Image: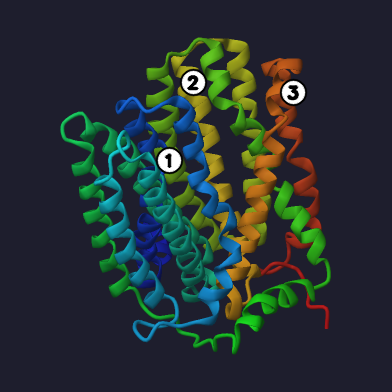
Amino acid sequence: MKQSNWIASYGNRRVLCLVGLGFSSGLPLALTASTLQAWLVTEKVNLGVIGLFSLVGLPYALKVFWSPFLDRYTPPWLGRRRGWIVLIQAFLSLSIFFLGRCSPVSFPLLVAFMAMVTAFLSASQDIVIDAYRTDVLRKGELGPGAAAGAVGYRCAMLVSGALALILSDHMAWRHVYSLMAGVMLFCSVFTLIAPEPEERVVSPKSLKEAVWGPLLSYFKRSGAVEMLLFILIYKLGNVMAGTMTMPFLLSVGFSRSDVGMVNKVFGLLSTIVGTLVGGTIISEIGINRSLWVFGFAQAFSNFSFAVLSLIGKSLPALVVAIGIENLCGGMGDAAFIAFLMSLCDKRFTATQYALLTSFMAVGRVVAGAPMGAAAQALGWPVYFSLSVFAAVPGLLLLTRFAPWNGGGKAAVPDAG
């Protein structure tokens, strides 16, 4: 990729600020999930109680229900989106700080309450940052913008996940969470320097319009229902492979250290590279063609696991398989996020984007549920080979919703 292409894609303020906002969006997630679970385990909290803490993640699944409120009302500072972001970042910093000051042994319910508050604020921040990203980017910047946000998000999860766990071996958990609260507060700097969207959009005039407007705006399009089906199944092959990656690698005989270093660390780096490369390619060939190219690439990347299952325990083969799968997956994610952004009406970006991503998440959860039984019945080589063909229905729907010779905008004509 030419250096000039990278500079053109990522070297402007609208795109660069999304790295910082993506980081802000990803930072709280592990602090209420894996990192919190590690803290509870070290404090010898009952496993049954730890299991119940998984309910803390509910706000991320239910965020669509209060997103109309964030579309309707505008704070009196920093504009329609940035005003909400900086306010939520301040409250998030406080909630993370006070979560770290709670005692899981003495006051587990208080820990659960503060974790739920943090997750609610984090989900709310996701709503507004996703909306801001959609509003601020020009048409040709959707790919690089999606990639920049995804890179920041994944780096933040590394900080609040792996780095937080390392720090917990050298300092008390309350100090770890206080440090993360400080990082969260610093993220407000990215919000303050981020530009306002060039297009001024009038907010819905009432909460009723904010609730029903996004639905009417979306479903008045012909093919709107089929589009939801496409969103559900486009990444079905990756869901099928990704759901069983960890059990597969451990069953082959790789150690947890091997899996941690290669699948988590090297896999993360491969995803970041794939996302950045994908964003640049999208700006060159458009969203539609990128969905085709990356769709086939991420489908056929699953063959690398089928080959690994035949080779058996081989560290070089593991590195190659993880590298290919994450590189192609990162490119596919960049294209799909850009595609979802292109569907949104800027009057209702918070609600429509939350709705579309929630629908995508439901599909991932439902599709992933029976995969363990399928892998057990078929065996790993057949299972991963079939995951390639699971991508075919989504690719076939591209002919309708993202034709190769169509523009970058999603090919969903208005009903009228």
> Which residue is the extreme one toward the left?
170
Q: Nearer the viewer, mark 1 or mark 2?
A: 1
Tell which of 54 and 49 is nearer to you. 49
Q: Secondary structure at mark 3?
A: helix
User: Identity of the amino acid at label 3?
Assistant: Ala
Tell me: residue 46, above or below residue 134: above
Tell which of 1 and 230 is nearer to you. 230
> Which image quadrant for residue 64?
bottom right
Q: Earlier in the sequence, mark 1 or mark 2?
A: 1
Is the Cβ of the residue at disc 1 closer than 8 Å to that at disc 3? Answer: no
> Disc 1 and disc 3: Cα gap in Å?
28 Å
**Residue 405: percent from left, percent from top:** 73, 64
Quarter of the image that includes the C terminus: bottom right
> Disc 1 and disc 2: Cα gap in Å?
27 Å
Q: Nearer the viewer, mark 3 or mark 2?
A: 3
> Which residue is the extreme one toward the front?
106
Residue bearing mark 3: 374
Q: Is residue 12 visible?
A: no
Does 13 sit left or right of 296 as displayed?
left
Residue bearing mark 1: 33
Q: Secondary structure at mark 1?
A: loop
Label 3: how many residues lie within 10 Å, few (<14), some (14-19) or many (20+)?
some
Q: How many numbered marks appear?
A: 3
> Disc 3 and disc 2: Cα gap in Å?
22 Å
Q: Residue at x 32, y 43 (%)?
A: 160
**Residue 18: percent from left, percent from top:** 39, 63
> Which image quadrant for residue 290?
bottom right
> Which image quadrant for residue 334?
bottom right
Does 372 sit left or right of 121 as displayed?
right
**Residue 353: percent from left, percent from top:** 59, 65
User: Identity of the amino acid at label 1?
Assistant: Ala
Residue bearing mark 2: 318
